[in-house]
Amino acid sequence: MEGMSARGSCLCGAVQLAVVAARQNLGACHCSMCRTWGGGPLLALESVSEVEIQGEENITVFSSSDWAERGFCKRCGTHLFYRLTTGDHYAIPVGLVDGGEAWTFDTQIFIDQKPSFYDFANDTHNMTGQEVFDAYQGS
């Protein structure tokens, strides 16, 4: 499969990920769940087309909503992925697989839930929560 390959592991090394992303882009999610999960916006690869995981026995999955779940290492707590329960959509935290690539930060979602105490300087495509739900229901 064509795309950019990236590898990474959790803090303790119990889980390793290999991903293929269609584009070298990432987005920020400002929803209240992502901000609670990580203490700030989730910066993630959104165009992931393949995920290979080693050490799956060390992963705990939390169903955070009716439509999505979040995976993390049960040993060290590293956030590993956000994925939809239907389809193959994964969002992989960019810090997990960043090897110094020249990422393109091009999208912000749930912009209507972004707190006013921070802003990103990048020129991005911004979507409200409703626009995100409409886009995924249409696919």
Image (cartoon, rainbow, N blue to C red):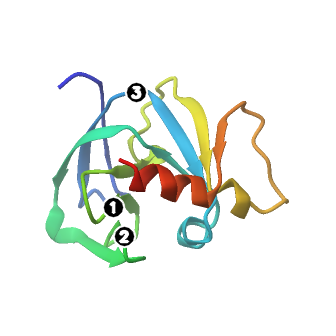
- Between the residue at mark 3 and the residue at mark 1, the CA separation in whole angstroms equals 19 Å
Q: Which amino acid does label 2 sit on?
A: Trp
- Between the residue at mark 1 and the residue at mark 2, the CA separation in whole angstroms equals 6 Å
Q: What residue type is labelled 1?
A: Leu
Residue 2 figure quarter:
top left
- Between the residue at mark 3 and the residue at mark 2, the CA separation in whole angstroms equals 24 Å
> Helix, strand, or loop for circle 1?
strand
Residue 4 figure quarter:
top left
Q: In which quarter of the image is the N terminus?
A: top left
Q: Which mark is residue 67?
A: 2
Q: Which mark is residue 23?
A: 3
Q: How crowded is mark 2: few (under 14 residues within 10 Å), some or many (20 or more)?
A: few
Point 43% across, 43% down: residue: 46
Residue farthest to the right? 117
Point 33% across, 40% down: residue: 48
> Helix, strand, or loop for circle 2?
loop
Q: Residues within 10 Å of mark 1 (few under 14, many from 20)?
A: some
